[in-house]
Amino acid sequence: MQAERGRAWVPWLVTVLVVLLAGGVLYLAHRGSAQAQAQAEEARKATDEANARTRDAEAARKQAEEKLAALETEHARLTTEKQQLTTEKDQLSQTVQEQEAELSKLKATYDDLQDKMKAEIAEGAIKLSQAQGRIQVDLVDKVLFDSGDASISKRGQEVLKRLGGVLSKVDDKSIQVSGHTDDSPPSQKLQATFPTNWELSVARAVNVVRFLQEQGGVPSRRMIAAGYGETRPISANATPQGRARNRRIEVLLIPDLKATKTPAKTARSQR
């Protein structure tokens, strides 16, 4: 009887054990699922954080590249500007040296003229001046010509030989020889040869140029002959002294345009 009762509890015990076991399995499964979800959530968060850091790193990289590109552009601009400044400095230095050399040559020519013409300068027959890279020699007509004549006098020949000795050494200037008169018309005796002061002034200038070339050794290609008649007085014609000053030959040494160098212009880059 007791044995039968004992056997009757076995199924219930088995059922209970099965239930307990199933519950344990379910509990463990639920717990495992929760842990898995937690781990998955943590993994997702870690992935999001990693993605965010990646995006931040990419943005920082792009920003750094942009800054680097800007710095390289600025460096290139500064390098170009430095080269331009260096070129301008070199050109300015060369220009200063050329100007100093030109002034030195100009002074040497001026001093040579003063020495060769000191007697005529002292007596007022010749006036010597210089300005703006030019030298001007004013010779009153009586030192070169007889009254009303265009032929060079003996004294004039001696003066022009000394003048030509200086001018023949000048190789970077054009030499303009211009004739000037007072406002008195040529005398009736001279009008057949020189109808007006134009002809007289031109003839005198041409004769001086020819003499400087033939007797003074001055290259003809460097000389210009011009006649201005009475149109460019330097004094009033109201007095004999004023008219005497206006009757003159001007010898002007001016820079040779063909030899003048035009410095290249450099444009600085704008900021």
Image (cartoon, rainbow, N blue to C red):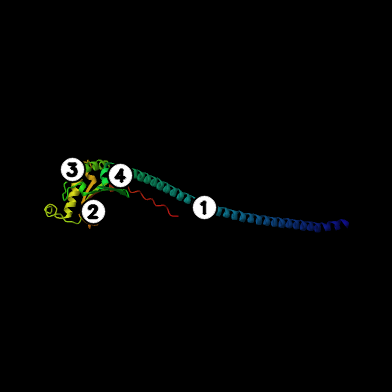
Task: Assess disc 2: are there few (<14), some (14-19) or many (≥20) residues with their C-alpha within 10 Å of its C-alpha.
Answer: few
Q: Which circle marks residue 67 in the picture?
A: 1
Q: CA distance from mark 4 to mark 3?
A: 25 Å
Q: CA distance from mark 1 to mark 4?
A: 63 Å
Residue topped by disc 3: 154
Amino acid bearing label 3:
Lys
Q: 23 or 252: which is nearer to us? A: 252
User: Would you place residue 183 above or below residue 212 in this image?
Assistant: below
Residue topped by disc 4: 110
Amino acid bearing label 4:
Tyr
Q: Which circle marks residue 241 in the picture?
A: 2
Residue 3 falls in which quadrant of the image?
bottom right
- Position of 224 compared to 74: left or right? left
Mark 4 residue element? helix
Q: Earlier in the sequence, mark 2 or mark 3?
A: 3
Where does residue 257 sit, x and y in percent of width and height? 28, 48
